[in-house]
Image (cartoon, helix red, strand yellow):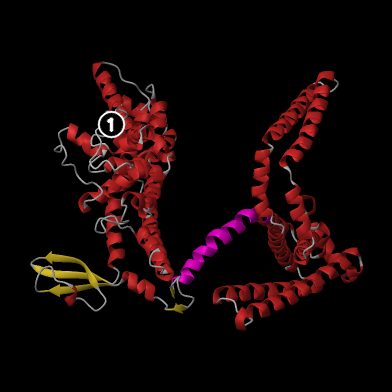
Amino acid sequence: MSVRRKGPRATIVRVFTYLSLVSVAVVVIFPFVVAFATSQKPPTWSCSVEPLFLKNPKPLTPPSCCSPMTSM
Amino acid sequence: MSDTITTDTADSADAEAEPRNALGTGLGRQLKLLSLWHLVGAAVSVVGILLARRGGDIELPWMPRYALQGFFSFAFVAHMASAYGIGARARWVRPLSLAVNYLLTLVAAAATLHLFNAFRALGDLGEGLYKAFIPFGVICVGLLWVLLSGQMLTNRPTAVGPQRLRTAGWSVAGLASVWFVLKADPSGLILSIGDSLTRPLALGAIALTVGAALATRLMWSRAAAKHFGSTRATDEALSGLAFLSPNLLGFLIFFAFPLLFSLWVSFFDWDTTNTTRDFIGLENYIRALSIDFAHSSQSNSGTEVLKGGYQVLANLDWFGQHWVIGARDVEFWLSLKNIMVFLLLAVPLAVLPALVLSSVLASKLPGMKIFRTIYFIPSVAGVIGVAIVWGQMFDATIGWINYLLDLLGVSEAGQGQGWLTQPDTALLAMVIVFAWMSFGFNTVLYLAGHQAIPKELYEAAEIDGANTWQIFRRITVPQLRNTTFYVVITTSILALQLFDIVWILARPIAGGPNFATQTPVLTLYQEAFTNNRQGYASSLAWVLFIIIFSFTSFQFRRQRDEATSGGVS
């Protein structure tokens, strides 16, 4: 695939290609981002009903659920 | 040793011409001593056999008893043969005596190190290094100066500056060494060595090591090679084996022996909580693989229609007929079913995206190196850590997967799917994690395969007007056939050995819910370490080995047939 095409269609193909690559990259990276974000939170934040990266979340009821290990 | 090993056929011819009474020379006396050494070894082996066979209160458990008897019997035969061969000047005795003495040197050296607490001293050494880290760093700096000055002196041998630098380097390293010794305080180590030196057993181990090493040295020598008429081919083989021996011995001791031992164990009713082991032949295999089909007049029949000892594996309705399938070990058969489903889903998900992505990443588009790096990250991440993160993401209440599905409107808020708690989706969750972890590495393998495809093929296809899909279908895929074969085989073997992901994700009940994620390796682990049935677990391991081996052989045969028939199109 060493020969490059030019023109509007090639541009669309290229944009689609990059979008696909970025989508896959997001899927690949996402668990690491979650892991990093979890490492920055206090234990009680890890069990929020809405999983948020760093914002102060609504705590889960009962609030004793405080660890991703025990919540699994 | 390397200076002593070269002999050739001329040497061999000289040896033939040498008079038979050469044993009166220096070499002859040494060989007489070596013969005596082997006779002593044979006598010690007999003592070893008798000690291993002793009964009464000090009777050894049966396994070490038989293992030691076998070991000393082998040693006795080898020593006696060596002693006889040296006297008879047999050509075969040199390799045999070398092997015996070399192995004896290794065993005796290991015993000596153990008796001197050398293995524990490694920990003390690390502690001492920690205490004296600064002087250690200064020593390194001093030696670095010496190295640098040496490099400078090779260009300008009479230069004063590098000579002074070298002197200063040695001085710094020497002073720092004294500082290191004072700081690290090796007095405990020295006292320990001194204490060990007073023990007869430790001294005997040293003597045995030195004696065996000297015997090895003698047999390795050119004079011995000439005396026993060794050919160049024999010497080359011995040199090769000597170089190979560290790896070969490690393989035999830590891989081949446990493997064969597990085969041996699989023929026993081997309960880890009991000392008795009953030989039961193939019973473990029969129990694992036994399956029963029974016709039933009604659907969802139970064990009443099956043979005794069988449990219901599945109820089937075929063409209006009700069938019950039973097995003696239902868990193992369920694990086989699960792993086959897992294999069929996970391997395509781990291989096909890798094939497509590698074709894009192999292009000259900007930024491809960044994407390659990103895709490879899951392959280098620890399985346990990654599985814990995915477990958190799959959580029904607080997990990201359900949260994102809610945002996209795929599911109702708060009514999220219990990915890991529902039997329908638990295995699928494992498939997703496995594919996520594997596809990056497979992509790299495919990228390596892309390098071997001739660029002229793509240029010719472009000139012929082929579109991207046609190029991919007709050039890339066939040219990557060998890579695909390797990728499919390795990914399939990994899939069939699935354990760690299930172990973490299916907690608190590994294999759950309702055996939905039970895998063969998990079953054998539970049999071995939860139910303490080592014999049965070993038989499951060998059944799994046969399955993987058959699968791999089938793939190899298919690949060979395709290659001989001109490949796929």
Where on the picture, by quarter, is residue B229? bottom right
Give the side of residue B261 with respect to residue A34, left or right: right
In this view, the residue in front, B388 or B299, is: B388
* Residue B291 at x, y percent in the picture: 26, 71
Residue at image point 73% right, 64% down: B101
Give the side of residue B125 with respect to residue B296, left or right: right
Q: Chain of mark 1?
A: A
Q: Secondary structure at mark 1?
A: loop
In this view, the residue in front, B26 or B206, is: B206
Image quadrant where one finds the C terminus of chain B: top left
Q: Amino acid at mark 1?
A: Leu
Give the side of residue A46 with respect to residue B262, left or right: left
Quick one: which residue is furthest to the top in this view? A7
Quick one: which residue is furthest to the bottom in this view? B56
Q: Which residue is mark 1?
A: A52
- Specify start and end residues of the magenta stretch as a single range: B242-266
Placement of B277 over or under B334, stated as above or below = below
* Residue A25 at x, y percent in the picture: 33, 31
Secondary structure that dominates the magenta span: helix
Where on the picture, by quarter, is residue A41? top left
Is residue B241 visible in the rendered image? The answer is: yes
